[in-house]
Amino acid sequence: MTDSEVGKRGNVYENVVWQFNKASDLMKLDLDIRKILGKTTNEIIVNFPVKMDDGRIEMFTGYRVQHNNALGPFKGGLRFHPAVDIHEVRALATWMTWKSALTYIPFGGAKGGIQCDPFKYSQSELERISRRFTFALGNNIGPEYDIPAPDVNTNPQIMAWILDTYISTMPAHERQACIHVVTGKPIESGGSLGRDKATGQGVVYTVEEWARDKGFNLAGATYTVQGFGNVGSWTALLLKQHGSKLLAVEDASGAIANAEGIDPEDLIAYAKKNNGLISEYPKARPIDRKTLFQTKADIFVPAALENQITADTAPLLNVKLVAEGANGPTDPDGDQVLQQKGIDLIPDILCNAGGVIVSYFEWLQNKRSEFWELEEVDTKLHRKIVSAYERVRDTAKEYKTDWRTAAYIVALSHLDTVYRERGIFP
Ligand code: GLU
């Protein structure tokens, strides 16, 4: 696709296709490899009934798309959100393949989810929804085959229910050997130290590298965040340790700002007491979405959903850096505007890779019956994500291209090498 075709897309999967074609053209990726990577391997859709607290039955639709497993088992999160559909899951699964390939972890890419608004359900309903979805997926997931993890609106508790349901259907003697069927578990159930903060930690490690490259001081730097779930809140908390100042933040309930700075720790405590929602936080004033985008700051961290930085919103941004904590927050039009405005970008498949990197560490610990100290997890995460950052930076220079395309080139080169070495069966 050429630049003149920017804007001719609809769903988020078309963004992936656009990004993939741009990088493939530039690196002159072999046409056969393009054909393979341009398709998903398996797309599983399950409809399943769940009994509600009042005795009614509700039907749910769940998805698991497995994009590619050339580098290792399929890997990626599960999200519970009304916007989940096959196009979104397909896009997210494909990004997971690139993410693992870019960071050199031995996983493929997958993603799944349930189309639902989880805030409408009680804890016991959520438990039954999670368990029944796991049961419906059956052997489409597995510890050496396809390993789910948390994503939007899912968490360690949900992973524990999935684990328990999965192993309950296994022969008794295999159960304990299966706890790595999901990652992002609670620590006591086989989770890893550092997994909860891992995505935010990875965002901050890449921002630190960017700051070092630019001779930029994070102490006193200002930033805004879109999304205050796991990724947004951890990123804010960790940037606070650098002495950076949070000026504005948005979540599903609305956006707030304070020119003096918002204390992320205090905001997290407030959100915990208010159903996870921040819009009525008393130590900031409510603002609209447009004002959030217009807020002058050094760094903007989108940490919510896809297609947020677009032809409409990108022109509003007044920042030096966009650090993509979310998957796919910028569409191709948005990318073009950022480039025209000279705003730096740490692309999603690099910036938010900390989550799946520490998922890999959790998986390894489970397989080896080990338990690593937090310091060991953080040190290993730092090493992995910084070397991926360096590969992307160097590739952007070599190809004289933007960082998203460079990240794709690194990931695709890795996959290309593997396909060349192994060939295609038969
Ligand atoms: N959902 C996270 C992501 O999008 C983590 C996936 C994982 O740990 O498998 O990268």
Image (spheres, rainbow, N blue to C red):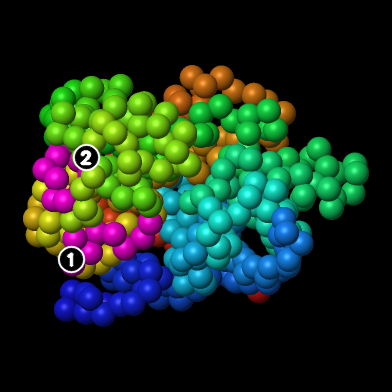
**Residue 24, magenta (yes or no):** no
Residue in view at x 51 percent, y 29 percent: 194
Mark 2 neighbour density, 10 Å: few (under 14) some (14–19) many (20 or more): some
Percent position of residue 116, x then y = 55, 63
- Could you tell me which secondary element the residue under label 1 belongs to? loop
- Determine whether, in the image, residue 191 is placed left or right of residue 101: right
Q: Which residue is mark 2?
A: 285
Q: Which residues are magenta?
A: 291-313
Q: Nearer the viewer, residue 122 or 217?
A: 122
Percent position of residue 12, x then y = 38, 69
Quarter of the image for residue 158 reads top right
Residue in view at x 48 percent, y 42 percent: 275
Residue in view at x 72 percent, y 55 percent: 53
Closer to the N terminus: mark 1 or mark 2? 2
**What secondary structure do most residues of the magenta stretch adopt?**
loop
Image quarter hosting the C terminus: bottom right
Percent position of residue 370, x then y = 67, 25
Percent position of residue 147, x then y = 63, 50
Q: Which residue is mark 1?
A: 312
Q: Is residue 90 visible?
A: no
Q: Is residue 163 visible?
A: yes
Reply above or below: 56 against 192: below
Residue most extreme to the left? 341
| Alpha carbon separation for disc pair 1 and 2 | 24 Å
Callouts 1 and 2 close, C-beta under 8 Å: no
Instruction: Check disc 1 and give the amino acid type.
Output: Asp
**Residue 307, magenta (yes or no):** yes
- Determine whether, in the image, residue 328 is placed left or right of residue 381: left
Mark 1, ligand 1, within 8 Å: the answer is: no
Mark seen at residue 75: none
Quarter of the image for residue 7 reads bottom left
